[in-house]
Image (cartoon, rainbow, N blue to C red):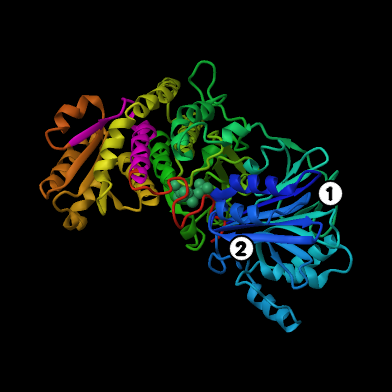
Amino acid sequence: MCGIVGYIGNQNSQGILVEGLKKLEYRGYDSAGIAVFTQEGLQVVKAKGRLANLESKLEEHPLAGSAGIGHTRWATHGKPSDANSHPHTDNSQKFSVVHNGIVENYLELKEELMAGGAHFTSETDTEVISHLIAREYEGDIVKAVQKAITYMRGAFALGVLTEYEPDKLVAVRQASPLIIGIGEGENFIGSDIPALLKYTRNVYILNDGEMAVLTRDAVELMTIEGNFIAREMITVDWDAVTAEKAGYEHFMLKEIHEQPRAYRDTMLGRVNAEGNKVILPELSLTEEQIKNIRNIQIVACGTAYHAGLVGRTMIESLVRIPVENDVASEYRYRSPIVSPETLVIVVSQSGETADTLAALREAQANGAHVLAITNVVGSSIAREANDVLVTLAGPEIAVASTKAYTSQLIALALFSLYLAEVRGTQTAEQVAHILAAMQALPEQVETILAQKDAIKTYAEQISDNKHLFFIGRGVDYAVATEGSLKLKEISYIHSEAYAAGELKHGTLALIEDGIPVIALATQEAVLEKTVSNIKEVKARGAEVLAITHEEHVTDLLKSVDQAFVIPKTLPLLTPTLSVVTLQLLAYYTSLALGHDVDKPRNLAKSVTVE
Ligand code: AGP
């Protein structure tokens, strides 16, 4: 999972490539490199580590030229090192390649190429591509690339340059995202829109099995077999500022603060004027299909999976259809029981998560109708699903997902209400009541954001703990799972989320003096039970923080050490508020520990490998 940029035009390409890579660092950041056509030929500079290392090298050895390719890497084959960084070249140094994805049969190809005399300088799968293209070149780079990829199995997005044809940049997409940016007298390639936004808003999105040949003045799109294709150009309406930090110290903090807007945008145009009906004209699901749904499976990874846990409760309580949750990497291998009456909902911020995409394909192959809830229009998942419900969170840059998660909750609530309307399980009054509560959420989030100083102080208190627990019942438990993941991924503190009633079946043994337990206590129907569970951990020495509503604080403070209040909403909607407290908690804990909040170790934003 890496980031690719490419430029061919009349400006000096080095700055454009580096700027583009900066916008793609969330896709991978263990090394980076660029290749540029200079007066001395095709030259490559690459460096292990953050992009700043590459920038320092480029200060010493600037590359002047108006066409080039660049790459930011997240290692899959071979450790992060200068040698394993992209771009990769062949032995003649005349061909240069950047690659995102995995060449599954690279070992076999490497052997074959070595037998033919190729000398390898890296441990990567990518290097086979540059050697293959060089081997197949007979005066036409497009044909050489087409021929080379017939030997390759796996997922790849490629940017290719050759010194023999310096007026061409060739791009290929096969199961890894790639877009083409159109400028005036200049054209671009990029793994994602933020890489190109500074230069153009006009893009073509390549589909799997397609390629593009870019010159300074034109872009030709074709299948990898060479059949020319016509494609409508998309104008992206994100502005460059939307993709920047907007004055916040980190993207994560900015994105936490963007949630009120993200909630509003995700609801926008999806509720009728009377406020008692959800309208989702983008869906192809017919009333008959909806009435025939017998079961629903919600499949996703990580944070998106946690959103699905809340979605399950929403659907089951509002529509009374049985729902299963599945981690996508498990779903695809567990022979899921699916029928044409099964609706599979895949949830993915990026729309590119390899496991979720594979689960989608598995579900479709078994006859299910697949609805995707995603934040990225034109992503692989959006294009392959039968229906798409887009979350309008805007680009999410921080690795730790925040506004995408809460927008997924809003989308799942809207979809649950839509199902309830069609199946007649909720009256128009009940729907109106829930929708009114949803419309109030953005302002309620603001009141939580206003508590950030108190949350920061608490975060600083807990930051030197090695272990921590989150507990809750019902949707509070679902939120606990997300709070725990958020804390783990950016603070590196071990934490576990437990269904509050389950602790006593083993995990209670881990509770000892001073261990922080964060208890979500927002669900009135089970509040007494949650309080009993809080007392169980308190009796064993835990320091308990409760997250609850104002009306319960006085009582709860008899059993806990501290409490944060979230505004009152309907029980089903509380996750959209309580999680904001937990996001801020994770953020400030990471900050207190001096970690790289936006780019936690070992992780990448978009996981496009299995
Ligand atoms: C969340 O903070 C993580 N970065 C991660 O769990 C993420 O949600 C997961 O990889 C799924 O990504 P997706 O939503 O883009 O499919």
Residue 503 part of the magenta-drawn span: no
Q: Secondary structure at mark 2?
A: loop
Q: Which residues are magenta?
A: 562-591
In the rendered structure, which amino acid carries the disc numbered 2? Ser
For this orientation, the residue located farthest to the bottom is 115
Residue 274 x/y as whole percent: 51, 15
Q: Quadrant of residue 517?
A: top left
Left or right side of 474 for 340: right
Can residue 353 be seen here? The reply is no
Residue 392 x/y as whole percent: 55, 33
Residue 592 x/y as whole percent: 33, 44
Left or right side of 196 for 351: left
User: Is the magenta region chiefly helix, strand or loop?
Assistant: helix
Residue 116 drawn above or below residue 127: below
Left or right side of 32 for 572: left
Q: Which residue in the structure is indicated by mark 1?
A: 215
Front-lying residue, 91 or 506: 91
The quadrant of the picture occupied by the C terminus is: bottom right
Q: Secondary structure at mark 1?
A: loop
Residue at screen point 63% across, 60% down = 46
Classed neighbour count for the residue bearing mark 2: other residues with Cα under 10 Å, few (<14), some (14–19), many (≥20): many
Q: Tag count in the figure? A: 2
Front-lying residue, 338 or 129: 129
Residue at screen point 83% across, 54% down = 168
Q: Which residue in the structure is indicated by mark 2?
A: 85
Disc 1 to disc 2, C-alpha distance: 26 Å
Residue 589 part of the magenta-drawn span: yes
Mark 1 vs mark 2: give the one in front: 2
**CB-based contact (under 8 Å), mark 1 and mark 2:** no
Task: Say whether disc 1 or disc 2 marks the residue closer to the N-terminus.
Answer: 2
